[in-house]
Each structure stands twice: as C-alpha cells, then as structure tokens.
Amino acid sequence: MTRILLLVATFSGLLAGPAAAEKETYKVTLGHRSLGMLQFEGQGSNAKLLLSLDNTPFGLDDGTFEAVTQAKGHEVDYLGTSRGSETRDIAIVRDADTVTAVKITPRSEMTEMTDAEKVPAGVISPTEFFAKLANSETCPSPMAMYDGRRVVQMATTAKKQNGNTVICDISYRVVLGPGYVWPFYFQSFDVHAAYDARKLATFSMSGGGFTVRLTRQ
C-alpha cells in the first residue's frame, strides 16, 4: 500500500486538546480513477487522518492508513498504522521540537533515519504537515516532516492568484533517508495545492509518471 499512501502522505474522531477544526473529507484519485477517501480533522499538534483505499489497480494497494498526533504539554506523540497488503506501525515521540524516540514494527521497515539522535530539530509529523495545509488559507510556509523513515523539506516556490483561487507550487524533497517507492527511491515530487475562498480545495503529488490528487468534498 505504501506506493500510493506515501504520495498523499500525506497522510476518525475528535482529539482531546484545543478545539478541533471541522471534519474534512477528500476524494483520492489516480488520474481519472477513484481510489478512496481521506478524512481529516484537528489542528496543530492535535490532529488525525484516515486514508481508506478500496479501488486501487488490481486491489494491490487497498487498505487503510491512520495517523494520529497528540500534544501533552511539551510532549508530542505520533502513531501511524498501515493495514492492507502490508502492515506497519510507526511511533514517534517529540519533546517540543526535538525527536526523543522512534519505533517501527516490523523492524525490516526501519531505515538509517529510524534513530532519534539523527533527526534534526524542528521537524513535524505527517498529520501536523497535513493540518498546516488543510487549515491554512493560502500557500504554506516552509516546513520539514519526519515520518520515522526519512526527513522531507517542503516550501512554496510559486504562488498565483486567479480570482478567489490561490494556486501554490510546492517543492517536496527528501533530504535525509531513503526516497519513496522501491526500487525507484524517488527523492522529490511535483506538488500543487489550490485554495478556493481561503479553503484547501485540491492537493496533488506527481512522480514517476503518476499523479495522486485529493479533492475536497
């Protein structure tokens, strides 16, 4: 399931903590093919997303990916679980902006970056990354995401205004750890986001000749 899941990264119930943002649902497509749905709610370091895929080509990547980030004072806990053609659990603990612990099951999914001491300060989790995108009203500020296996840097490289719609070109680069999708190990993707009336309307990632798109419902 990782080949598509990692393209949306990207990627439920209300979490304890600050008042949550409204629940959002996105349709997931590959070209003209509907793959499933992504549900997201929360804000900041208290957020949850659930990706459900039930129509991938030949059913090879069907399954679910659920990710939860929750803040407890200075501590921020992240848990990501994949269930389907493969099973993977990733747990990350952060003290403020410093990763203090990381665990991946099974161990065969670990990489050289599954080591808290090697992770630079200032990274955020995949759910915090999506929260910044979903809760923003315009193109996101630069950020670095750590998923337990690699560190990715993202930054807006271009911004266009078309009436009430803002279109963002975003640089998405793996800077530490392996690339995505064995055996290709892609190090970068073309990423685009569109905000309509100050709300995230679409988000797409392209790589290896494929484009996965999220469209707000």
Image (cartoon, rainbow, N blue to C red):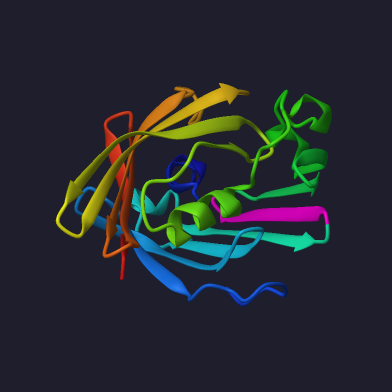
Say if the magenta span includes residue 78: yes
- Which quadrant of the figure contains the C terminus? bottom left
User: 174 or 112, which lies in front?
Assistant: 174
From the top left corner, tell me how far across and down residue 178 is, in percent.
Answer: 58, 23
- Secondary structure mostly seen in magenta is strand
Vertical placement of residue 190 versus 43, above or below: above
User: 160 or 83, which lies in front?
Assistant: 160
Residue under the image location 48 percent in, 31 percent down: 181
Residue 11 in view: no
From the top left corner, tell me how far across and down residue 85 is, in percent.
Answer: 54, 50
Which of the 4 image quarters holds residue 26? bottom left
The range drawn in magenta is 74-85
Residue under the image location 20 percent in, 60 percent down: 164
Say if the magenta span includes residue 197: no
Residue 215 in view: yes
Residue under the image location 32 percent in, 28 percent down: 208
* Left or right side of 10 for 89: right
* Left or right side of 30 for 45: right
User: 180 or 118, which lies in front?
Assistant: 118
Which of the 4 image quarters holds residue 53? bottom left
From the top left corner, tell me how far across and down residue 38 is, in percent.
Answer: 44, 63
Vertical placement of residue 165 versus 110, above or below: below
* Left or right side of 174 for 105: right
Vertical placement of residue 193 versus 182, above or below: below
